[in-house]
Amino acid sequence: MDYPLTLAQILEHAHRIHADKHVTTLLPNGTLHRYNYATLYQRVKRLANALTELGVQRGDRIATYAANTYQHLELYYAIPCLGAVLHPLNVRLSPTQLAQIMRQAEDKLVFVDSEYVAQFQPLQDKIDFLQPVYFGPKSADTDTSYEELLSDAKSAYTWDIRDENSAMGLCYTSGTHGEPRGVLYTHRSMYLHTLAANQTDVFGLTEADVVLPIVPMFHAMAWGLPYASMFAGADIVLPGAKYTSIANLIADTGVTVAAGVPTVWAAAHPELRKRKTDISSLRRVIVGGEAMPPALIEVYEKELGVEICHAWGMTEMSPTGTFSKLRSKHQNLPDTEKWRIKAKQGRPIPGVELRLATETTDGFKELPWDGETIGELQTRSPWTANGYYKIEPTPEHFTNDGWLRTGDIATIDAEGYVQIVDRAKSLIRSGGESISSIALETALLKHPYVQEAAVVGIPDEKWGERPVAVVVCTKQTDENFSDILRQQLISEFPKFWIPDKFICVDEIPKTSVGKSDKRTILMQLTGSQPPVEKSRIRNSTRKKS
Ligand code: ADP
């Protein structure tokens, strides 16, 4: 059959087969809002009618400025299912950046979370051509209220997406290096991504799961979890804008699978550890966006008995590319060996093609999968973009033979396990050799003094660049902490890899999606602004031999 793959199929299936499953949202007042898929379905249909009444047409971009809540989930379905394009805005970007993005996207409407009304105001001033719809109560008669729109709308709506290749979503990269770029997803690409993500050896969600996406719904479509969870019939828990305790949320709702960037799990660990018995429902944590340090994997698996699944992907890949699970032959390995394998970014999920390449004068040459050869990671799949929104594809991002250049430098071993060595833009070039910032950070994090670490390359007249480590220390550190950390690295790395300086700071700057913000760190180290150093800075400069 020529059967179009659309998100309406996911919604209809979820409603028909799993109508009694629940969506729970943590509200700002600390209470839980809870309804079932049947109610969600009725509200989505009303919303589709309301949007149509507002003049929304096929192909229109509709922005959301919202946290992970049930209203946002309703928009995740209503907008694409009526043929328009869902455009979740990264609420942590500046109003100037967002206004530029919205102008490029030509958003027709914007939905605003009740918790973000004040922070939306400066953006509203820049995009006053758009009348926002507010999730919360109206503050002026001229405001448009989401709930009023829904209660005034008709309840019957028939989905009519015939072309599976029509756009369903527009997401911008988080802009870790450079300005955010837009990526357009189609119904077909998101449907296929959902099927792939739900395989047992990938997210492996089932009807019995209770899924907590802590990853924001504006970060690469919450990694596809809103669609994967509902297709599986899992309960969904949405943390809203102001969760204070992940442990309480897990304990109160019986979360079995949670997903977020490593920073979230590093911060949550002390609290989860205290509440070990209450959070016994949690069986798996999906983590990605940046490298999950093996030391963190170890504490979760050993102390909390929670399986850590490390994933790699990109906004350009909808976003899932690889998923790290042990193979059957690894089951009898010692734990430390298992964690070492799990700390790799994993193997390509079914449907994703990867190649390791190096650029030559004759084009790209493929490199061997031997776990040692380092090359540029390139990919293609039914859910990988072949261009950026309203930007002509350039050879910097796409090859002539149709592969996406991920910008990541990696090795791939004979079994297909990818290990990201660095982003090309973060790789430190010193004296003509490469130094992996990720490898140094991973090694530093093994030391009990080190809670967080980021290594950057600062310009150096003689060597081109030299590594400098910025670390958050766990407690009162030793006066000689630089020497201690240097010793920690010296046995693992060549001498020229060892950072010239170790700087202890209170916190490491983060990007809008919680990754280490190396651009800002570099600026603080080299520019006019000093890094946020502790009152007593203990650093030292290594003499190069
Ligand atoms: P941005 O490039 O602006 O950060 P994305 O959030 O889409 O936007 O980030 C994709 C990039 O994040 C990847 O190319 C890779 O560099 C990094 N990344 C994602 N997952 C991982 C991971 N598990 N380990 C290391 N790096 C990762």
Image (cartoon, rainbow, N blue to C red):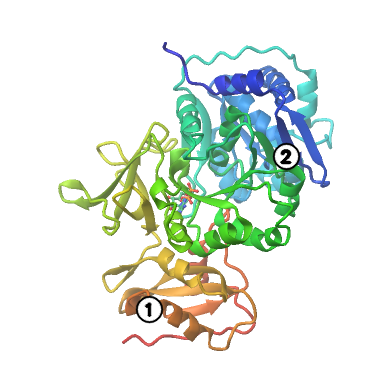
Q: Residue furthest left?
A: 362
Q: Quadrant of residue 138?
A: top right
Q: From the viewer's perspective, is residue 208 above or below residue 179?
A: above
Please name whichever residue, 282 or 367, is drawn nearer the observer in this view of the structure. Answer: 282
Q: Mark 1 points at which residue?
A: 491
Q: Within 10 Å of the Cα at label 1, are there few (<14), some (14-19), or many (20+) other Cα atoms?
A: few
Residue visible at 41% across and 39% down in the picture: 349
Of the numbered discs in the image, which one, if any, rests on residue 355? none
Q: Mark 2 points at which residue?
A: 113
User: Hey, what amino acid is under mark 2?
Assistant: Asp
Tags 2 and 1 touching, CB below 8 Å:
no
Please name whichever residue, 523 or 307, is drawn nearer the observer in this view of the structure. Answer: 307
Q: From the viewer's perspective, is residue 298 above or below residue 104?
A: below
User: At which x and y percent is residue 488?
Assistant: 45, 78
User: At which x and y percent is residue 426?
Assistant: 40, 62
Q: What element carries label 2?
A: loop
Q: Is mark 1 on a helix, strand or loop?
A: loop
User: At which x and y percent is residue 274?
Assistant: 72, 62
Residue 137 visible to an observer of this rendering: yes
Spatial CA span between label 2 and label 1: 51 Å
Residue 461 visible to an observer of this rendering: no
Residue visible at 46% across and 25% down in the picture: 188
